[in-house]
């Protein structure tokens, strides 16, 4: 991957798609190209310098590795069926479905 070496830093990783971490679920996907470039925390990979202007106006992004604690989300809720000042353990985002189904009394067989 030496030809992919960046002239202005090394805060990224490059993978051949078949060698990406299994947890990314990229191997064998027709939507993923031959090479995957992963920016490290604080790095963004942009197509053009003009994209930098767009990036400045954004208040969030996605696609970061949630194994990195400083890149995880914060979940806060308020409402009649939500406990006040209660801290809970971490949970996966897919569990929000169960929360909302319960709050809206949606029960499925």
Image (cartoon, rainbow, N blue to C red):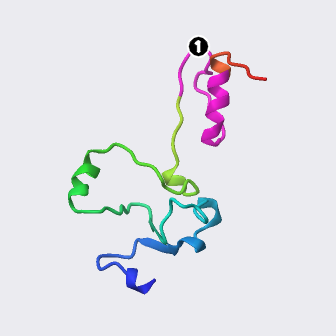
Q: Main secondary structure of the magenta part?
A: loop
Dot 1 corresponds to which residue? 80
x and y, in percent, of residue 82 in the image:
61, 20
SS at circle 1: loop
Determine the image quadrant of residue 23. bottom right
Determine the image quadrant of residue 40. bottom left
Asked if residue 72 lies left or right of residue 3, the reply is: right
Please, is residue 97 above or below residue 91 in the view?
above
| Magenta span includes 83 | yes
x and y, in percent, of residue 77 in the image:
54, 26
Seen from this angle, which residue lies furthest right? Answer: 109
Along the line of sight, which residue is nearer the eye, 29 or 88? 29
Determine the image quadrant of residue 2. bottom left
Seen from this angle, which residue lies furthest bottom? Answer: 2
Seen from this angle, which residue lies furthest front? Answer: 30
x and y, in percent, of residue 13 in the image:
47, 72
Q: Residue at x 44, y 61 (%)?
A: 41
**Few, some or many C-alpha atoms within 10 Å of disc 1 (few <14, some 14-19, many ≥20)?**
few
State the extent of the magenta-drawn residues as a range.
77-101
Q: Residue at x 79, y 23 (%)?
A: 109
């Amino acid at each position: 991957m030496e030809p992919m070496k960046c002239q202005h830093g090394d805060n990224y990783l490059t993978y051949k798609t078949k060698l990406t971490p299994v947890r990314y679920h990229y191997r064998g996907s027709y939507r993923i190209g031959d090479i995957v470039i992963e920016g490290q925390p604080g790095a963004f990979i942009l197509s053009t310098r003009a994209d930098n202007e767009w990036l400045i106006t954004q208040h969030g992004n996605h696609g970061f590795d949630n194994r990195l604690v400083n890149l995880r989300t914060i979940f806060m809720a308020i409402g009649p069926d939500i406990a006040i000042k209660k801290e809970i353990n971490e949970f996966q985002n897919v569990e929000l479905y169960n929360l909302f189904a319960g709050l809206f009394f949606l029960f499925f067989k």
